[in-house]
Amino acid sequence: MNILVRADSSSHIGLGHIMRDLVLVQQYPNDLITFACQELPGNIMDQIPYGIHVLQSNDPKELITLIQMLKIDMIVFDHYGINADFEQQVKEQTGVSVFSLDDTYEHHHCDILLNHNICANSNRYRGLVPTSCELRCGSAYTLIRDEFKNEKTFSREKIYDIFIAMGGADTANLTMDILKTLDTSLRICVVTTTANAHLEDLKRYVKGQKNISLHVNSHEIAKLLHQSHFSIVTPSVIVHEVLFMETPFVAIQTASNQDDMVRYLKQHNYNVLKEWTNDSIAQFYHS
């Protein structure tokens, strides 16, 4: 097939959509993959190893023209700014198959719907998608990067006490808030990306603190996590990977679209917080 992925990344919306789409398209090794993205501040288009068409807007007309020009067979939508009406307009005017990713049980006009969260419930999509839609929900469809699957086959020395990953963009600057509460005796690994608008402040804070190791745009996230006793993450894509690696963790909610995952984690007795406080680490981590 000729597949087009419509997703964006930025310092504001984060990087998770693109990251999981890169895992998804690995399921189509014999097909032609192209991405369509807007050039937003802090995007990670340079990390997409496929052809990219830069869109000037999120207007369906622009996308329809591109689909027709490229003779696309299937479009993958992974975008909170694209709704069922948008999807229907694209499908009716181009005839493409529509594959939609969803986290929050929204209306979709699609042929395939993927909610890869381990907490996803296909019954909740009744009335939200066409009756002919193929539903792919739950842990059987969870997208785990190959680097984690490969890393789990190794044994690693634990050289870090705490692993911190508050999302590639960390729009709320939670990494800094957390670091200020942690004892200097702890060996800390921080991962982030250049999409983090607070990166320079973070670099200045870490400079000279020998117990903190800062990794920017790392390609060894799985290894760093595996080398850590405990992790502090968000209840988003990365929590699937932390669970897969069986690393003890606490998840801090940073967005409303994480509500379902937060409920799931609480129901299964995992550590979840609405906010981080000065004594939070003492509640969960014991050396």
Image: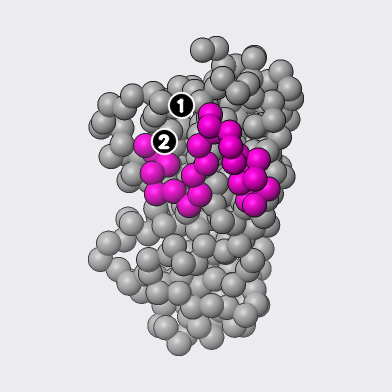
Residue numbers of the magenta segment: 199-223
Q: On the image, numbered disc 2 is attached to which residue?
A: 224
Q: Which residue shows up at 61% across the image and 46% down it? A: 203
183 horizontally vs 231: left or right: right
Q: On the image, numbered disc 1 is attached to which residue?
A: 160
- For the N terminus, the quadrant is bottom left
**Where in the figure is residue 233, as x and y percent of width and height?**
57, 34
Disc 2 marks a residue whose amino acid type is Leu
Q: Which residue occupies the extreme top position in the image?
A: 286
**Where in the figure is residue 209, as x and y percent of width and height?**
58, 33
Residue 256 sits in which quadrant?
Answer: top right
Q: In the image, is residue 68 part of the stretch drawn in magenta?
A: no
Q: Which residue shows up at 64% across the image and 66% down it? A: 41
* Mark earlier in primary sequence (1, 2): 1
Q: In the image, is residue 211 part of the stretch drawn in magenta?
A: yes
Q: Which residue shows up at 53% across the image and 77% down it? A: 54
Q: Which element carries disc 2, helix, strand or loop? A: helix
Looking at the image, which is closer to me, 51 or 157?
Answer: 157
- In the image, residue 17 sits, relative to residue 41, either above or below, namely above
